[in-house]
Amino acid sequence: MLRTHTCGQLRKSDVGSPVTLCGWVENKRDHGGAVFIDLRDRYGLTQVVVGPPEANAELIDAAGHVPNESVVLIRGKVADRLEGKVNAKLATGEIEVRSEHFEILSAAQTPPFTPGQSDLPGEDLRLKYRYLDLRRKEMQDALIRRSEIIKCMRDYFAEHDFIDVETPILGRSTPEGARDYLVPSRVHPGNFYALPQSPQLYKQILMVAGFDRYVQVAKCFRDEDLRADRQPEFTQLDLEMSFIDADDIMGLIDGLVAKTAKQVLGKDITLPLPRMTYEEAMRRFGSDAPDLRFGLEIVDVTSVAAKTEFRVFRGTADAGNFVRGIRVPGAATLYSRRQIDELTAYVQQDFGAKGLAWFRVEDDQTLWSPIAKNFDPEHLAEIREMLGGEPGDLLMFLADTWEVTCKGLSGLRKRLATEMKLYSPGDLNCSWVTEFPMFERDEESGRYVAMHHPFTAPLAEDLPHLVDSPEKCRAQAYDLVINGSEAGGGTIRIHDSKVQSQVFELLGMDEETAKDRFGFLLDALRFGAPPHGGIALGVDRWVMLFAGLDNIREVIAFPKTQKATDLMTQAPGEVDSAQLNELQLRTVSVKT
Amino acid sequence: MLRTHTCGQLRKSDVGSPVTLCGWVENKRDHGGAVFIDLRDRYGLTQVVVGPPEANAELIDAAGHVPNESVVLIRGKVADRLEGKVNAKLATGEIEVRSEHFEILSAAQTPPFTPGQSDLPGEDLRLKYRYLDLRRKEMQDALIRRSEIIKCMRDYFAEHDFIDVETPILGRSTPEGARDYLVPSRVHPGNFYALPQSPQLYKQILMVAGFDRYVQVAKCFRDEDLRADRQPEFTQLDLEMSFIDADDIMGLIDGLVAKTAKQVLGKDITLPLPRMTYEEAMRRFGSDAPDLRFGLEIVDVTSVAAKTEFRVFRGTADAGNFVRGIRVPGAATLYSRRQIDELTAYVQQDFGAKGLAWFRVEDDQTLWSPIAKNFDPEHLAEIREMLGGEPGDLLMFLADTWEVTCKGLSGLRKRLATEMKLYSPGDLNCSWVTEFPMFERDEESGRYVAMHHPFTAPLAEDLPHLVDSPEKCRAQAYDLVINGSEAGGGTIRIHDSKVQSQVFELLGMDEETAKDRFGFLLDALRFGAPPHGGIALGVDRWVMLFAGLDNIREVIAFPKTQKATDLMTQAPGEVDSAQLNELQLRTVSVKT
């Protein structure tokens, strides 16, 4: 080793010891004929003094001219800091190293930015010079936390007898769900591998093979247009178990959540985590990933709306649609008319709502609103009572289709909670949503599409609906929700090849296509398949939530931009025509 | 859980307990009006009895007709086996479960083969029905051992303060070394990502970023024509450290070898592992990955050959080539003339040797051979003495170029050791080979190519040779050799951008090309780069060697064939033209 200690290691008890340190020059200042250097590495910061009597004039001069961010090696003795110079904020703050030897291992040119500077440059520049950005303590902490969380997950599943199995990255394209990344084959020209969107089929095959408990931290890929929190490649904690039901998987993950929260954040989580059905989540929170860090529950007042004279409410009720609202405690003095107009524009623009009806609860418990005159006071009292409104509250309502009231009120809940600071950044709220519908209707084609994926088993009691009314069929599915984000999702799988074929058919796949794409799975289910199920947890999302961050690119060492570009290496890039010839490929301009 | 116990769990102390087991019907037999079932899962085998009085006639009949490999659930009580029916070879061999309830969870059709059958079908069929092949105990053991070895590695590096960082799979193509797998970009038509051959550049960037100690179990990819022990995607234990030298890396890996051997095999390994230079390895064993499980060391007798009358020997010496041989103890009675002729054909065909000269050491210490008459007895005595020949030994020689004597004698060593059983299958011999040449000459172009990769640092003392005679330049490189196979390799890296540019130039890369491909690395080295180095261990190879297997496909859950095909999923496959249109690609027939 070039060094005897790291820059975070030396303490008062080391005073007098000869040491060698290596690190980056974060800062330096001249003071009283000596040069003071803040020497930095991953472990901390140590003050190094190059000055008399240990250092001669030449050494002091050299130290004075070393550019910041250079890598240096320093030999010297640990000394007490002078009275009054102790830095209590620094782990090494009681000592300094008085340098007898000073050597530049790598002189730095002036970098585009330094990790110590307070004003961060734009993200593009930070991504281009990622090695500089990754020198920042925040970035190092995030990636170290990522490493700890993944270690914690792996240890947990090893303790529970899971086998870590690697599944292939070069797989078969199955053109449904998201878009695949393709990899042309040189040995079989005209044929392509696909990068996996998940190890779904392989892990089911492992269950048919009798592995019983499988786990993997798996790289997955989706060639989708990227949102702020999506990346073309992402990491999943993927697992599968045999001879279990949905309760077993949720119970297992409950334990992981508690262990991770305890180990990484020192937080105690009460188990079991709360569970609610999809139906309940949509009814009470308008979302299948409800944020339970705060209240603002949705209340359905359609029954009262139907009785009122207010045209918008009654018309909605008469058309079989819904009037639903939330009570916002104490908001009456916080939100001006202008701010409420902004909320109205928000639900109109983002969710297609027709408008936002609102009431203020007055001191005498009556409701005031520009539209209040359209209501019988008795009906208003009824509405206030249903929402539990108290003086100073605002009550807000959407009158619309089920979908628009769900989306609009869910959006409103989140916006109000953020603006009113109804939760604190350190909160960690975890819960389950279960019994999702098996199928949704694709709006364009009118076809059924699988809400999770086509391998999901229906609830046993809903199995008959597969034939008569698939839309009523609920799945043995469960999503883990953390702070209103989906942090994982899983299902019990179909282990009967006949049911699997039936589902393929419902999804509009003819027998030949099903056989071509999933023949090996249908075969496997015929040769003795155990009941099985599993879950995949979004590791990037977990780390982001557990680290209290809100940008997924801050928890990934080398992320891609929203245009799927690596700004440091300039990937993707052009390739030699010889490479394309070998693959028997041509690039062409195609209007799409 | 559907079951209360696994099929490997019940013991004599459980007798009388009610239990529920799930598993596969491995075998069944009728005996005395009852059906005996061997119920199997990953954990073991339990004997289940479906018979009176616990089971009624209907249940017994059902059990008698369940096809083998079906998955069943059984409820019953644990009972002692009858006197004389105890199976000491089975962990559950003292008990049986007397079934009261019997339920088929998944009836199996007759599979193409069963895991219990003694005659294995061909590998292609086993790969097609991988879920059946993976039910075999040998395959489950190999993959469980793989999982254990990787866990052991990860724990070791976590204990040593390494941070597990994931590097991208979608990277930039750098067309040198092996062939890249390319991934067309949809967002940037005509541009491609490449799957990484290793995380080399990313891990160096992490060192420049100050991560100090990085580790990853990384998927790597090479689109090469496959040899028996190569796969298009393979797994590396990849690591990098700052402020260290070659000794530190070797010492660290020594500890890992010892820990893995102890934990996985219960073997004690003496540390430090032996080290020899490349020069010594080639001189003594003719190989840079010498198999040290046995002797058969190479001895150079060119100095004597130059004095003899034997035309072949003297001619070789006169031409500046080499006469080198090995002593094969006790081989005189083991190898007939015909068998020696086969060895001669082997070195001629496989290594281009001109022939094989051999001598038998007689009881009186003289050498007998068809060519002995061409030698002065004094020279023969000198040769025998140089090799330490004893009565009953064979001495074998090649007279050829340095390269041919190395390759031929190395091949001969391995073949003889295998045939003569000079090592046992359980042996685990680990050592280091160091100080490889920096460059080799490409035979076709005459150009220098990097023996490890272009980021390897030369030995400090050889740095001046970079300018005057690059072929004399030795690298700070080290390969880990286990049982004559390269099980890992690493180097100390160049951390000076000027030296790096110099090496790029030596490798025939002009400045513009170097900047285009590796500009970000050259930049990074200018902004404060620590001295650093690392290593990559071949995980598939490690598992194979530690599991005592000789086919790499037996330690990979879903391997590809030598034509890079997955026979189960039929990857690679055709894709929709819509997919290619989106990528602006066409497949064409190109004569290559």
Image (cartoon, coloured by chain):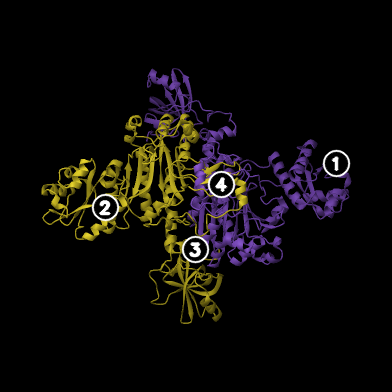
Chain colours: A yellow, B purple
Q: Chain for mark 2?
A: A
Badge 2 crowding class, 10 Å Cα cut-off, few under 14, some 14 to 19, many 20 or more, is: some
The single residue placed furthest to the front in the displayed view is A591
Q: Is residue B291 left or right of residue A360?
A: right
| Residue A322, x across and y down, in percent | 23, 44
Residue B314 makes an appearance in the image: yes
For the N terminus of chain A, the quadrant is: bottom right
Q: Report which residue position mark 4 lands on.
A: B234
Element type at marker 2?
A: loop
Which is in the foreground here, disc 1 or disc 3? 3
- Label ID, residue A294: 2
Q: Report which residue position mark 1 lands on.
A: B370
| Residue A306, x across and y down, in percent | 17, 43
Which is in the foreground here, disc 4 or disc 2? 2
Give amino acid for label 3. Tyr
| Residue A358, x across and y down, in percent | 20, 53
As measured in the structure, the alpha-carbon distance from the residue carrying label 3 to the one carrying label 4 is 30 Å
Which is in the foreground here, disc 1 or disc 2? 2
- Mark 1 touching mark 4, by CB under 8 A? no
- Label ID, residue B355: none
Which is in the foreground here, disc 3 or disc 2? 3
